[in-house]
Image (tube, rainbow, N blue to C red):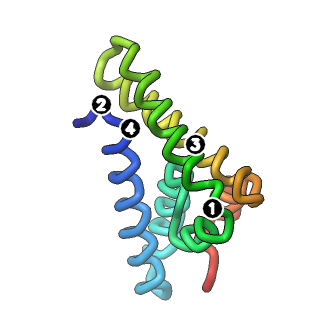
Amino acid sequence: MLRSIWFWWIYMTLLYLITSAIVYHNEATYAYSYLAHAAVFFGLFVPYGFLSWLLMFYNLLSIPIFFLTMFYAEWTLNKENVSLGKRILFNLIALLLITIVIDLVRFTPFASWNIFFSGHLPRF
């Protein structure tokens, strides 16, 4: 289970959504900045994030590309016989690259990185 890129995609998406929801709910607290930084970091590994899921329907090409890249990454990583720690690292690197690919396909190049470097979540 920990070796699967699908597990890490779901796990990182849940972390991103939970931290984002806490940030939006408690935006006036001191912990806001730390949680916002954690949320945008998790967002680097989530191709369809808090607001970008709407763009999934705007550009339907991103959906098959997402699934093709996920299956290809899983297939490629399964061919390698590496330790669990390296496999987790490779899964996260693959998710980071898939996020970049999906950003490019949706015509929002490096949007995840722009959000990350701005240090806060986008506003509604």
Mark number displayed over residue 3: 2
Count of marks overlaid on the render: 4
Specify whether residue 121 is in view.
Answer: no
Residue at image position (42%, 85%) is: 26
**x and y, in percent, of residue 39 in the image:** 48, 63
**Label 4: how many residues lie within 10 Å, few (<14), some (14-19) or many (20+)?**
many
**x and y, in percent, of residue 94 in the image:** 52, 35
Kindly report the distance in space between the C-alpha atoms of the residues bearing marks 3 and 1: 16 Å
Front position in the image: 30 or 57: 57
Specify whether residue 77 is in view.
Answer: yes
**Label 2: how many residues lie within 10 Å, few (<14), some (14-19) or many (20+)?**
many
**Label 1: how many residues lie within 10 Å, few (<14), some (14-19) or many (20+)?**
few
**Secondary structure found at label 1:** loop
Say left or right for 111 vs 78.
Answer: right
Kindly report the distance in space between the C-alpha atoms of the residues bearing marks 3 and 2: 17 Å
**Nearest to N terminus: mark 3 or mark 1:** 1
**Nearest to N terminus: mark 1 or mark 4:** 4
Point out the frontmost of discs 1 and 2. Answer: 1
Residue at image position (45%, 67%) is: 35
Mark number displayed over residue 98: 3
Discs 1, 2 touching: Cβ within 8 Å: no
Mark number displayed over residue 116: none
**Secondary structure found at label 3:** helix
Q: Which residue is mark 1?
A: 60
Please tell me whether residue 100 is drawn above or below residue 35 in the rendered image. Answer: above
Kindly report the distance in space between the C-alpha atoms of the residues bearing marks 4 and 2: 7 Å
Kindly indicate the quadrant of the structure image that contains residue 119: bottom right
Residue at image position (66%, 44%) is: 101
Residue at image position (41%, 68%) is: 17
Say which amino acid is labelled 3.
Answer: Ile
Mark number displayed over residue 5: 4
Front position in the image: 64 or 84: 64
